[in-house]
Image (cartoon, rainbow, N blue to C red):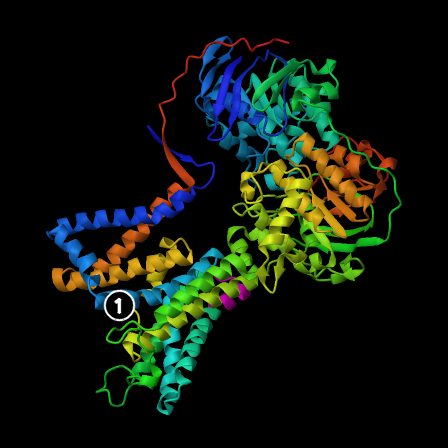
């Protein structure tokens, strides 16, 4: 008989092994799914996981799609460690894209070198403002930030839709719902000529370092960790709960907003009805699979990015539905959560308890 | 009755080869320090957990007790240390829930009244549990067991929540039960009680039987030796003159949002430099609320109701009060006094940030570790170094660490809640001595505790918190346990005994 038993201490090895186990389990399930769909599994695997990155352009696409995932994931990890459940990074990303684009559309003609930094700043602020709404509602009225952040995603998308169908529509755009193309001064420079990946990827790596420093070395980071691990201890030590909520939401909003503006000022180059294929939601998975640790988040973002690329390739070459990307993402999160159980627990084989015949001790001492 | 009982857990052997024998009508003490394996052993008897080895003989026959229901059918009842009652239900409803068979409501109510009167445990079956005091709730638990007509009743540390007078009433009930042939297993670490009540005793130490005795023929010292395997340390309070007022409460009142909480009503108290003031009383009489008001976790609107070193501090948050020189040891160690998964070093940073462990927002790792190591060394904390997680320490060791941390932060006022709850005898003495040393160095110390013996040992003055009101303070030397017990019932009028009803009506 197998029995689940609590470990005396959470297993450190398992904490690291869990995402790897999840990735393998995801691949095995994918193998079964491909087989059931009548695809040659080896071929499908090649198309899905190898082919997209077997050339330098493909590799640059991998980094390109990983960038917003890293940015959003870093911010979310800080919020989750602080026990603040921001699941609306997608909305903050959209707002960052809108705010940054607003700068481009207002000052774009000037061609000044200050336009791009200002756009990035506006993107960050846009995301922060959008995250400030749930922060205010939570600290003032004790609303649930999970619901508010999620619902604001759809509001942000509708605001975007309104702008590009109305005031910000490109007059020379044949009535398509999109803004004018950004000029060179409003676009992030690419890392390598001929590729699409921009300097935003380097920025994301720098921020990963900064986020590690914040959590590991600063007192402010320590306070958010305490608030997440033991709220009563945070109150006892006098760490303000409100400040913690504000900080967590503003940081995660800022990085999501930055991701948004880096998308429109990068590969997209204009404001469109859809500025993100769900990066803000996928970043939740990235944060968890990456163990809420910056290094893990970078690796997990690369994996998720590969799933996006593989999903596109599978659509084109294997005529699989686009849902296959979401399927793999879901499998990954599902397995990592399942494998996480074994951080705190282990399975032990137990023999059914029979009365063990023990030699009778004469410990009885009638007093 | 029990032979060779062994129970292993992943990291410890809780019981190893334990045997004990209880005869009909005998009150048998199971004595031991926290963590000695008393509760594990009782859970084996009550069928809550299965032993890895050993056997149980019940009325001459070998038995396996599969679960508590089976234990109840065999005639074994147990009153747990922590009550398992639904506060929003009535007494009768609570008891009906625990019965293994259905009994018509009227009949049950009549049974409850009959049994409770027979054993001197008056309770009203129609009362809602949340309106009852702790002592009354315990009666409900006992009556619930008695309704099953047990042949063996297990009591797990039953007196830890009772006033001295209520303890005496409980003992009368237990003696009457025993005289009717019911055996009682009485678990405790309080030596006086065991000597007063029990016929025989089995002493446990580190999961093993370290001796059996007839308590009436033993002294506290001899029992303690069996229990802790060494001599009891002592600590002494030498009289000294108190200094200026450092903590002053003036008509402190606090309403509580918790429907089962206790509001504080007009509390007046002053604590001087160089004295220890003890606040006695049973938990649930406003202790939690008073502590939250003092620490700043529940700020007071009228700032002047709390004065710290003369400054109005009622509306300050815990961090601001710490800046004024207050440190605080809460009653919950894991999750409040310490962050369980964090290392001891980081747990030093929790409240020690202002003591050179942070500069320009950056954590200074070296001074944090130095401080943690100093605490571990000075307070003899048994741990795997300052990188060990707080959750890996035993309750007593973690308490030593927290008390040590708050002491070495050089407070001017220190508030300590339940300093030795669940702490073994040796560590208790070390903690008490640390508090006395702090007092001798001129710190104002306020101790809130349920242990009267402890308060008399270390306090210069004692007051009682009952029903959210604070009694007048008395010099410890000028009062006694009897008087404090009366005050614990909420009757603060002079020293006149308050009749038989010694329980507290918690408001």
Can you give x and y, in whole percent of width and height, for residue B460 in the image? Answer: 83, 41
- In the image, farthest residue toward the bottom: A110
Instruction: Tell me the chain of label 1.
Output: A
Question: Position of A226 compared to B453: left or right?
Answer: left
Can you give x and y, in whole percent of width and height, for residue A215 in the image? Answer: 50, 58
Q: Which residues are magenta?
A: A134-144
Q: Which residue is mark 1?
A: A60
Q: Residue at x 42, y 68 (%)?
A: A255
- For the stretch drawn in magenta, the main secondary structure is helix
B301 vs B284: above or below:
below
Q: In the picture, residue B293 is in which quadrant?
A: bottom right
Q: Residue at x 55, y 66 (%)?
A: A140
Magenta stretch contains residue B307 = no
Local secondary structure at mark 1: helix
Magenta stretch contains residue A135 = yes
Can you give x and y, in whole percent of width and height, for residue B103 in the image? Answer: 49, 27
Can residue B349 be seen here? The reply is no
A158 vs B396: above or below:
below
Can you give x and y, in whole percent of width and height, for residue A96 in the image? Answer: 39, 74
Question: Position of B356 compared to A9: left or right?
Answer: right
């Amino acid at each position: 008989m197998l029995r689940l038993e609590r470990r005396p201490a959470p297993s450190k090895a398992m904490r690291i092994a869990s995402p790897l186990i999840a990735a393998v389990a995801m691949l095995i399930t994918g193998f079964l799914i491909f087989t059931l769909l009548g695809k040659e599994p080896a071929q499908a695997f090649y198309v899905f996981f190898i082919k997209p990155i077997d050339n330098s352009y493909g590799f640059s696409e991998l980094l390109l799609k990983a960038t917003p995932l890293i940015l959003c994931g870093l911010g979310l990890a800080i919020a989750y460690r602080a026990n603040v459940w921001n699941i609306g990074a997608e909305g903050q990303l959209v707002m960052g894209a809108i705010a940054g684009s607003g700068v481009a559309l207002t000052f774009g003609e000037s061609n000044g070198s200050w336009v791009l930094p200002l756009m990035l700043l506006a993107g960050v602020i846009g995301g922060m403002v959008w995250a400030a709404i749930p922060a205010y509602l939570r600290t003032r009225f004790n609303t649930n930030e999970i619901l508010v952040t999620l619902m604001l995603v759809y509001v942000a998308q509708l605001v975007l839709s309104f702008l590009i169908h109305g005031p910000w529509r490109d007059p020379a755009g044949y009535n398509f719902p999109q803004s004018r193309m950004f000029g060179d001064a409003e676009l992030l420079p690419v890392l390598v000529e001929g590729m699409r990946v921009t300097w935003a990827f380097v920025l994301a790596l720098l921020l990963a370092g900064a986020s590690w420093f914040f959590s590991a070395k600063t007192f402010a980071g320590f306070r958010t960790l305490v608030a997440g691990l033991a709220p009563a201890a945070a109150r006892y030590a006098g760490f303000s709960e409100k400040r913690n909520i504000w900080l967590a939401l503003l940081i995660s909003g800022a990085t999501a907003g930055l991701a948004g503006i880096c998308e429109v000022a990068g590969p997209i180059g204009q404001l469109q009805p859809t500025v993100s294929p769900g990066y803000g939601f996928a970043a939740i998975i990235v944060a968890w699979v990456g163990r809420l640790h910056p290094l893990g988040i970078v690796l997990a973002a690369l994996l998720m990015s590969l799933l996006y690329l593989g999903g596109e390739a599978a659509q084109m070459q294997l005529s699989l539905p686009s849902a296959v990307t979401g399927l793999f993402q879901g499998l990954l999160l599902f397995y990592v959560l399942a494998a996480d159980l074994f951080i705190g627990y282990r399975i032990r084989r137990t023999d059914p308890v029979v009365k063990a015949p023990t030699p009778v001790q004469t410990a009885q001492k009638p007093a | 009755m029990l032979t060779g009982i062994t129970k292993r857990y992943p990291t410890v052997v809780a019981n190893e080869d334990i045997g004990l024998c209880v005869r009909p009508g005998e009150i048998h003490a199971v004595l031991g320090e926290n963590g000695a394996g008393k509760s594990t052993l009782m859970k084996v008897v009550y069928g809550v957990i299965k032993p890895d080895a050993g056997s149980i003989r019940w009325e001459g026959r070998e038995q396996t007790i599969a679960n508590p229901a089976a234990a109840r059918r065999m005639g074994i009842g147990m009153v747990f240390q922590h009550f398992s009652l639904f506060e929003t239900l009535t007494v009768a409803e609570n008891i009906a829930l625990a019965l293994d068979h259905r009994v018509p409501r009227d009949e049950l109510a009549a049974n409850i009244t009959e049994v409770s009167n027979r054993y001197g445990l008056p309770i009203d079956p129609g009362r809602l549990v949340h309106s009852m005091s702790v002592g009354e709730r315990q009666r409900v638990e006992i009556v619930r067991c008695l309704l099953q007509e047990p042949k063996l009743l297990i009591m797990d540390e039953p007196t830890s929540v009772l006033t001295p007078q209520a303890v005496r009433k409980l003992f009368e009930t237990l003696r009457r039960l025993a005289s009717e042939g019911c055996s009682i297993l009485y678990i405790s670490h309080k030596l006086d009680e065991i000597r007063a009540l029990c016929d025989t005793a089995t002493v446990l130490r580190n999961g093993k039987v370290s001796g059996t005795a007839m308590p009436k023929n033993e002294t506290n010292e001899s029992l303690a030796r069996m229990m802790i395997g060494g001599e009891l340390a002592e600590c002494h309070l030498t009289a000294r003159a108190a200094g200026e007022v450092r903590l002053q409460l003036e008509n402190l009142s606090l309403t509580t949002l918790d429907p089962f909480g206790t509001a504080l009503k007009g509390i007046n108290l002053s604590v001087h430099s160089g004295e220890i003031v003890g606040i006695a009383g049973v938990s649930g009489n406003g202790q939690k609320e008073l502590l939250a008001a003092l620490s700043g976790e529940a700020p007071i609107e009228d700032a002047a109701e709390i004065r710290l070193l003369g400054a109005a501090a009622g509306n300050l948050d815990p961090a601001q009060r710490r800046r004024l020189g207050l440190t605080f040891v809460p009653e919950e160690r894991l999750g409040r006094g310490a962050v369980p998964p964090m290392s001891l070093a980081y747990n030093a940073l929790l409240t020690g940030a202002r003591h050179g462990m942070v500069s320009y927002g950056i954590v200074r790792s070296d001074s944090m570790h130095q401080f943690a190591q100093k605490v571990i060394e000075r307070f003899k904390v048994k741990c795997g170094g300052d990188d060990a997680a707080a959750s890996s320490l035993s309750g007593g060791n973690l308490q030593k660490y927290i008390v040590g941390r708050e002491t070495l932060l050089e407070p001017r006022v220190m508030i300590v809640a339940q300093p030795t709850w669940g702490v073994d005898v040796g560590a208790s003495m070390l903690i008490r001595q640390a508090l006395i040393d702090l007092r001798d160095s001129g710190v104002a110390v306020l101790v809130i505790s349920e242990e009267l013996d402890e308060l008399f040992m270390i306090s210069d003055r004692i007051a009682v918190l009952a029903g959210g009101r604070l009694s007048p303070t008395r010099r410890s030397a000028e009062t006694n346990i009897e008087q404090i017990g009366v005050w614990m019932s909420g009757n603060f009028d002079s020293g006149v005994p308050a009749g038989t009803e010694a329980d507290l009506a918690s408001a």
